[in-house]
Image (cartoon, helix red, strand yellow):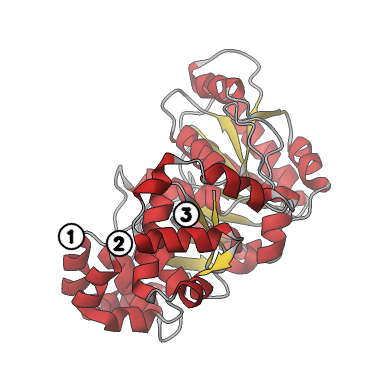
Amino acid sequence: MNEKSVYWVWLQQALKYNNLKIKYIMNFYEDIEKFYALGENEWRLLGIFTNKDIENLKNLSMEKAKIILSNCKQIGCEIVTIEDKRFPYLLKQIEDPPAVLYVKGDISCMDGKLVVAVVGTRKASNYGFEMADKISKSLAENDAVVVSGGALGIDSAAHEGAVAANGKTVCVLGCGLDFAYLASKNNMKYEIIKKGGAIITEYSPGTPARSWTFPARNRIISGLSHGVVVVEAGRKSGSLITANLANEQNRDVFVVASPAKSEESSGNLSLINDGAQVIRSGDDILKEYSSRSLAGNESDFLCSAVSKKSYEFKKDNSDQNVCKEDTFQKKKEVAETDSRIKDLNEDERKIYEAVSEGVMQSDSIVEKTGIPSYKVLGALTTLELWGLIKSLPGKYYEII
């Protein structure tokens, strides 16, 4: 926890959770205090906030954020902000990372490790329990970190399997850390921390579990991980949400082969039909990653095999390798035929043309175009929402 933590807590409380604008602010403002100091008029000029956003930013007292920090001290949890070096690298790359994580245990346990989420239904069959346990044990025994959501059923079996193998596991909660919600055994949270793992959440102390908190939580489970294993999932299982989020985040999706048709595994069949990779053991996952170079820094992340699909998911044949020499030229030629280009205003067109020349950092865009930074941020947001450009780690942008 550092002196700037209170500003990030304030921002997350003001903009709430699962908000794309958090990343825009992080990419464009190196100092969160400067963003806070802008005030209402400057926030409006940025062009990315709704009237409700502005009211929340304006009216949320910094005292509330300070109270949250005080509550964290009382319950013994750390605050890790998105600008903190300890913030999980893979999670920072998703479109809507949390501004703040509340942590008990060692969040750095995932650094440099293969991280695999193991998820599934709460109403698991005996086969589902057995497979979740075996897969998690196998991963943990081979120094991989198992991530799951702490719920009854498959989640609990995943955490317990990793702990039983003296391995590390990370539990992502859909509520504040002060609520008694974790796995099927009351002492599981102590075992997770004792083995060097962590319990984390984006929800501040005092936030209860609600129906909407779990779908939002799922993006963190997949975002932390190189791949997601769906052990057993019904048609309406939240695990299917996690699998879809994983696909959107360019993570691998694995599904456990079911020995027989059942309601508990009906979602598995749907994932298989969509092209998810079928596995039968933890060894299948380990073999899949054995020849890959896991992300160690931003350039490695962009160019590593981890950032490419190893299977066709939902019939998507698009090239995932952003490192090919002719990528940008091809994108530029395709984009020039896009009918949306003609609807851009002068600033948006200048910025689009600048980025068309190759990957460009936001500060360089300001320098090249001569457009004020607050206008550049608003235009970049518009171009990204229109699907004309996308953001990359390190405040870089490229055309799609």
- The one nearer the camera, 226 or 171, is 226
**What x and y, as percent, mark residue 88?**
57, 64
Q: Which mark is residue 48?
A: 2
Outermost residue on the bottom side: it is: 3
Among the 4 quarters of the image, the one containing residue 251: top right
Q: CA distance from mark 1 to mark 2?
A: 12 Å
Q: CA distance from mark 1 to mark 3?
A: 21 Å
Could one spot residue 377 in this view of the protein?
A: yes
- Is residue 277 rendered to the left or right of residue 395? right
Dot 1 and dot 2 residues touching (CB under 8 Å): no
Dot 1 and dot 3 residues touching (CB under 8 Å): no
Query: Which of pointers 1 and 3 lies earlier in the amino acid sequence?
Result: 1
Could one spot residue 92 in this view of the protein?
A: no
- Residue identified by numbered label 3: 95
- Residue identified by numbered label 1: 52
**What x and y, as percent, mark residue 383?**
41, 54
- Mark 1, secondary structure of its residue: helix
